[in-house]
Image: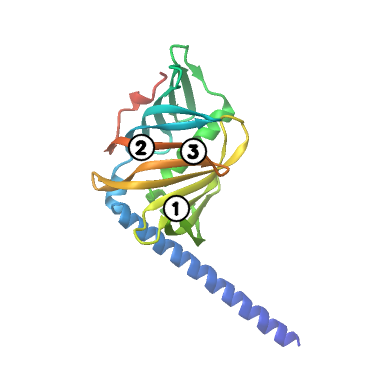
């Protein structure tokens, strides 16, 4: 009896180990395929900075607010963005945000620039981390764990996914088009700026175009707790190996 129990436990242990090993191998294979589809390791590793311009719509309650944005990031710790919001009644709001290492600032219209509080800063840094790992190369770092997600459907496309975990950051789920291996959805827990509460945010990507050898999504649709919150069309993309650090000084 004891021998049978031992053998059963041994078989379970070996089978579990094999499953984990297979999962790790399949996760790496999926990531390798996604890197190749997005432009290849050399291209993705080369460009550590990017500038995006976009236009779109935010849904605030029952109201649609038009937006234009111009933002530049470098690595995972530098960001400068200017977002202009315009309501149907003509009211206009211009917000400039800068994050540089362990400091961040906000400037609204012509008001004096304010340094952001700790909670806001931490939430923004987490979103910058999510943006960073979407370059895919950071997912190869040894401190990031990758777990396969069940196959699903994103829009009308079959998709396979990975969950990325890091000891210093929140987990992020990425889904890849099963056929093309391009990232078509990302999901994470974020702090909603409207309510201050944590929500599930999902972003779906489409309209991929080649930019300097890299495949870049030119359309994004945002959801929070399943409710559509915005949609955006990328109008211009510039990839750079590096941009001037002076861009990320206090606005």
State how far apart marks 3 and 1 are (Cα). 23 Å
Dot 1: what SS? loop
Q: Are marks 2 and 3 in contact (CB under 8 Å)?
A: no
Q: Residue at x 48, y 70 (%)?
A: 22
Q: Residue 220 location in percent, x, y? A: 40, 42
Q: Residue at x 58, y 29 (%)?
A: 194
> Considering the image in quadrants, where does the C terminus appear?
top left
Residue 182 drawn above or below residue 111 = below
Q: Residue 2 location in percent, x, y? A: 75, 85
Q: Residue at x 30, y 28 (%)?
A: 244
Query: Which numbered disc flags the more N-terminal residue, 2 or 3?
Result: 3
Query: Which numbered disc flags the more N-terminal residue, 2 or 1?
Result: 1
Dot 3: what SS? helix
Scheme of colours in the image: rainbow
State how far apart marks 2 and 3 are (Cα). 19 Å
Q: Which residue is mark 3?
A: 127
Query: In the rendered view, does 136 fall on the left or right side of 121?
Result: left
Q: Which residue is mark 2?
A: 233
Q: Residue at x 44, y 53 (%)?
A: 155
Dot 2: what SS? strand
> Considering the image in quadrants, where does the N terminus appear?
bottom right
Query: Which numbered disc flags the more N-terminal residue, 3 or 1?
Result: 3
Q: For residue 154, which quarter of the picture?
A: bottom left
For the residues carrying marks 3 and 1, which lies nearer the camera in this image?
A: 1
Identify the disc placed on residue 155: 1
Residue 52 drawn above or below residue 159 = above
């Amino acid at each position: 009896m004891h021998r049978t129990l031992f053998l059963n436990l041994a078989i379970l242990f070996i089978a579990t180990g094999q499953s984990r090993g297979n999962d790790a191998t399949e996760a790496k294979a999926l990531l390798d395929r996604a890197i190749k589809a997005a432009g290849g390791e050399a291209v993705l590793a080369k460009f550590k900075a990017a500038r995006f311009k976009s236009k779109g719509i935010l849904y605030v309650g029952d109201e649609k607010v038009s937006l234009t944005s111009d933002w530049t990031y470098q690595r995972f710790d530098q960001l400068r963005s200017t977002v202009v919001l315009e309501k149907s009644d003509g009211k206009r709001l211009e917000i400039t945000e800068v994050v540089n290492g362990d400091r961040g600032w906000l400037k609204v219209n012509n008001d004096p620039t304010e340094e952001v509080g700790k909670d806001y800063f931490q939430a923004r840094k987490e979103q910058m981390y999510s943006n960073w790992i979407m370059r895919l190369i950071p997912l190869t770092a040894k401190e990031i764990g990758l777990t396969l997600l069940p196959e699903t459907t994103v829009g009308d496309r079959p998709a396979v996914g990975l969950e990325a975990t890091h000891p210093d950051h929140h987990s992020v789920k990425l889904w890849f088009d099963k056929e093309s291996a391009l990232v078509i959805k990302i999901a994470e827990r974020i702090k909603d700026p409207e309510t201050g509460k944590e929500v599930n945010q999902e972003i779906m990507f489409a309209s991929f175009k080649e930019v300097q050898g890299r495949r870049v999504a030119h359309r994004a649709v945002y959801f929070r707790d399943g409710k559509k919150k915005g949609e955006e069309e990328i109008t211009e993309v510039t990839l750079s190996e590096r941009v001037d650090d002076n861009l990320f000084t206090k606005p």
